[in-house]
C-alpha cells in the first residue's frame, strides 16, 4: 500500500484534500488545531466545498468552540450547509481525513503535522465504511454561536457601518476571542467598539441578544465590569417616555487614542 506525504502543515493537508473536489469528507477525531485550521481553510476556499462531516471528541470541540473567532466561522459553514458536527464516542480512533477514495492520516512529529495519504482501494473502502457507521451512530454537536457573516451584516444594518468596521478590525487583531486572558470575548469587544462610537447600551445589547451573541443581562453585567475597571463610562440620554438610556463612551485615554486594530491590545494591557 503506497503512501504519500500531502504536507507538513494542517492547512496544506486540508487544502490538498479540498482541491481534489471530493463529494464529502469526514474529519475524524481531529485535534483542536486541526478543527481550527480546517474551519479557516474551508471559509476561505474559493472552489465548491464538499459536505464536511466533522466527528470529534466532545471536550475538544467544546474547547475549540469557546473561541468566538473559530465558532462563528464554523457557524458560517453550518448555515451554508457545508459543515455538520457530531460527537465521536470512541476517542481511540486515529486522527484522519476520509473521502470515498482517499484516507489521510494526520501524524504529529516535531511540531509538524504531516498528512500521510493512501488511495489503496481496499483500505479506503474499509475506512470509509467504518467512519460512515461511526457517523450514523454519533450524536449531534450543536453550535450556539451565530455565523460571523450574519453578525457583521446585522451590526452594519442595526448599529452602523463604522461600528461594524471597528468590530472587524478588532477581531482581525486577535488570535483568539475567549475572554480567558488570551483574548477579549465577543461581548467585551462589542461593548468597546460601541463605546468608541458612543452607541447606546440599549441598542448594542438588543443587537447582541437578537443576533445570538449574548443576553441583554450579560451585556449589562459586562458593561458594569468594564466600568469598574475604568475602561468605559456612560452618560444618560433623555427619551420622550420612560427612564433615560445610557450612552457608552470610552473612559481611558489610551483607548481613545488607539486605532481599532490596536484597541484590543490596549484594552488587554489595561485589564492585565
Image (spheres, helix red, strand yellow):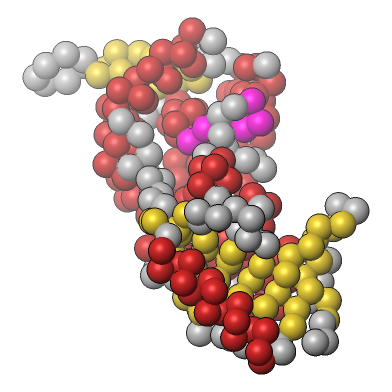
Q: Measuring 34% from the left and 37% from the top, which residue is drawn there? A: 208
- 71 relative to 25, above or below: above
Say if the magenta span includes residue 183.
yes
Q: Measuring 38% from the left and 45% from the top, which residue is drawn there? A: 144
Q: Measuring 58% from the left and 66% from the top, which residue is drawn there? A: 27
Left or right of 150? Residue 239 is: left
Dividing the picture into quadrants, the one containing residue 86 is: bottom left
Q: Give the percent coordinates (x, y) of residue 210.
A: 27, 41
Q: Is residue 148 visible?
A: no
Left or right of 256? Residue 226 is: left
Left or right of 237? Residue 56 is: right
Q: Residue furthest bottom?
A: 121
Magenta residue span: 181-186
Q: Measuring 79% from the left and 62% from the top, which residue is drawn there? A: 107
Q: Give the percent coordinates (x, y) of residue 12.
A: 75, 70
Dividing the picture into quadrants, the one containing residue 223 is: top left
Tell which of 79 and 235 is nearer to you: 79
Q: Give the percent coordinates (x, y) of residue 151.
A: 40, 49
Q: Residue furthest right?
A: 110
Amino acid at each position: 500500500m503506497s503512501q504519500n506525504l500531502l504536507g507538513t502543515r494542517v492547512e496544506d493537508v486540508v487544502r490538498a484534500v479540498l482541491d481534489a473536489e471530493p463529494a464529502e469528507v469526514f474529519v475524524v477525531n481531529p485535534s483542536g488545531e486541526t478543527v481550527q485550521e480546517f474551519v479557516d481553510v474551508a471559509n476561505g476556499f474559493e472552489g465548491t466545498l464538499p459536505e464536511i462531516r466533522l466527528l470529534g471528541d466532545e471536550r475538544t470541540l467544546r474547547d475549540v468552540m469557546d473561541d468566538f473567532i473559530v465558532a462563528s466561522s464554523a457557524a458560517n459553514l453550518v448555515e451554508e450547509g457545508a459543515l455538520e458536527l457530531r460527537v465521536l464516542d470512541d476517542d481511540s480512533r486515529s486522527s484522519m481525513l476520509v473521502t470515498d477514495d482517499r484516507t489521510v492520516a494526520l501524524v504529529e512529529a516535531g511540531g509538524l503535522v504531516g498528512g500521510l495519504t493512501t488511495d489503496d482501494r481496499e483500505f479506503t473502502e474499509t475506512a470509509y465504511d467504518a467512519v460512515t457507521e461511526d457517523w450514523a451512530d454519533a450524536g449531534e454537536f450543536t453550535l450556539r454561536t451565530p455565523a460571523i457573516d450574519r453578525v457583521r451584516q446585522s451590526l452594519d444594518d442595526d448599529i452602523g457601518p463604522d461600528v461594524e468596521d471597528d468590530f472587524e478590525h478588532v477581531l482581525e487583531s486577535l488570535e483568539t476571542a475567549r475572554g480567558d486572558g488570551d483574548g477579549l470575548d465577543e461581548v467585551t469587544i462589542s461593548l468597546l467598539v460601541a463605546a468608541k462610537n458612543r452607541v447606546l447600551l440599549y441598542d448594542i445589547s438588543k443587537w447582541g441578544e437578537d443576533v445570538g451573541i449574548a443576553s441583554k443581562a450579560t451585556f449589562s453585567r459586562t458593561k458594569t465590569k468594564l466600568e469598574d475597571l475604568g475602561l468605559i463610562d456612560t452618560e444618560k440620554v433623555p427619551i420622550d417616555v420612560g427612564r433615560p438610556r445610557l450612552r457608552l463612551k470610552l473612559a481611558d485615554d489610551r483607548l481613545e487614542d488607539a486605532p481599532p486594530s490596536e484597541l484590543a491590545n490596549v484594552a488587554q494591557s489595561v485589564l492585565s
